[in-house]
Image (tube, coloured by chain):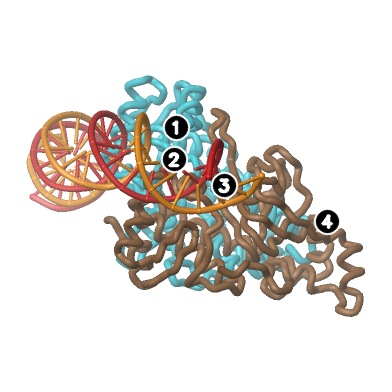
Chain colours: A cyan, B brown, C red, D orange
Amino acid sequence: MPEQTLDGCRRCSLHGVCANQDAPRRDAALRRLGVSRGTLPVGRALFHAGQNLDALFALRSGSIKEVLTRPGGSESVVHVSVAGEVVGIASLAGRPSRTSAVAVTATRYCRIPLAAVAAVSNETPGVAHELMRMLAEKMSSAQEFVSSLIEQDAVSRVAAFVLDMSTRLERAGFNGDRFRLGFSRRDIASYLGMTMETVSRAFTELNRRRILDVRAKDLALLRIGDLRLLADAATT
Amino acid sequence: MPEQTLDGCRRCSLHGVCANQDAPRRDAALRRLGVSRGTLPVGRALFHAGQNLDALFALRSGSIKEVLTRPGGSESVVHVSVAGEVVGIASLAGRPSRTSAVAVTATRYCRIPLAAVAAVSNETPGVAHELMRMLAEKMSSAQEFVSSLIEQDAVSRVAAFVLDMSTRLERAGFNGDRFRLGFSRRDIASYLGMTMETVSRAFTELNRRRILDVRAKDLALLRIGDLRLLADAATT
DNA sequence: CGGGTTATTGAGGGGCATCAAACCTCGTGG
DNA sequence: CCACGAGGTTTGATGCCCCTCAATAACCCG
């Protein structure tokens, strides 16, 4: 299973922000804007709940889960991100984050200060529009994904999750038919609103029906059509 | 139960876009931008799935449900909006809407062309930021709301829904303790991912415990603390 | 007042949570 | 190198919540 790392900035969601600098002096320009790179070992947090964020994070490799801790103390995974995607969009709301972003696998990222985003947006309206477009896109696809989750049974939810991961990995230029799922059964369960055991049984079922090939965290999508049927299945 | 209508533009989410015109010539400026008002009877659509949207809609009164029709033909409510809120945010993504927006109660709205939004944003960066902030805010609160739904039982889901409605009505300047819910049990059920019967049973239960006073569609929040406890209840 | 839609209430069955135990995986240290 | 242990995963048995089907009741509008 190849490691999933962006081979450059071209597939990055925030490409527009960085690429807009003059090519010859790009590095200097990016440094002046405060853009920096970093790495994160498994289990470490990109940011914590309550923290006042002033940057977006573009993932170069790895995977992140955003965890919400409720008043009662229970935690649940409210969002997952993979290479090529942006974490910390909620920071644009200008209030402390209510979620913590934890590395599920070793992760490399670019940190892009909000000030840089704002500066580039102001001098290049196209970038502002692009950001807006990205937000709206993310919003409506999240809405659809969630609504498809809430109405369906366990196997369909897992199918939808796998398809979603596949689509998003492909968007970043990876192989969407065969990939290693960084997230544990427990994380997936939390994200999908069910128990670890039920997620496991769903994977077993999909494997038995030869729709997926499941080898622990390594997945192969054998029959994408059937997977899509399951995910879109209308219970009503 | 008083009708819920914004008494002006001050509580409108898109106030920034319109209010930024010169006061003396505001009407003319707004007309030039293509901002217009309209009304919608019950059951009529603000826009249809597949339609290419070129405007945002700010609700002056009434309530809207956004319905997603799946490949299989089944429909589900993926979003609800009340007076003071904006419908059609997905149009910022620049592709045809996948949802239809249907009036649940008689609705009055302002139609604000995207061109107007872009024009104002360009000449006033503050407005662009405000829009971005609004999007991010909407996104993260939707995320939290949904994640609280997905993990909880029927009574908690309904409690969370009622609280959410209450909060949003208050934000627009209405009474959040006592209001008429425009949405039918069926709509609520679809939105919350359960059946009409279960929603009904949940309301009955909340009424029996005197946490809500339920008279068909008229609700009174008797013990908001307990309601919040239920909504935030951590099953795990 | 009557027809149609919407809401409520009841009885029964199925899917998922829960509890429990065995198995696998992988890093750690002997 | 392998034994060991801790966490992750799978599988099984049982009970409960919610969906389904069905009937009655309330509401709304002509």
Density class for disc 1 (Cα within 10 Å; few <14, some 14-19, many ≥20) is few
Q: Callout 3: helix, strand or loop? A: loop
* Residue at left offset 45%, top offset 26%: A221
Is residue D24 toward the left or the right of residue C25 in the image? right
- Between disc 2 and disc 3, the foreground one is 2
Q: Amino acid at mark 1?
A: Thr
Q: Position of residue B224 (x, y in %)?
A: 39, 71
Q: Callout 1: helix, strand or loop? A: loop
- Name the residue tied to disc 3: A84
Q: How far is disc 4 from disc 2 in space, using C-alphas?
A: 37 Å
Q: Do the dots labelled 2 and 3 sit on one chain?
A: yes
Q: Do the dots labelled 1 and 4 sit on one chain?
A: no
Q: Above or below — where is B146 with respect to B212?
A: above
- Name the residue tied to disc 1: A235
* Residue at left offset 82%, top offset 66%: B120
In front here: B215 or A16? B215
* Quadrant location, the N terminus of chain B: bottom right
Q: Are marks 1 and 2 in contact (CB under 8 Å)?
A: yes
- Between disc 3 and disc 4, the foreground one is 4
- Between disc 3 and disc 1, the foreground one is 1
- Name the residue tied to disc 2: A151
- Between disc 4 and disc 2, the foreground one is 2
Q: Earlier in the sequence, mark 2 or mark 3?
A: 3
Q: Position of residue B65 (x, y in %)?
A: 60, 50
Q: Please give the label number shown on residue B21.
A: none
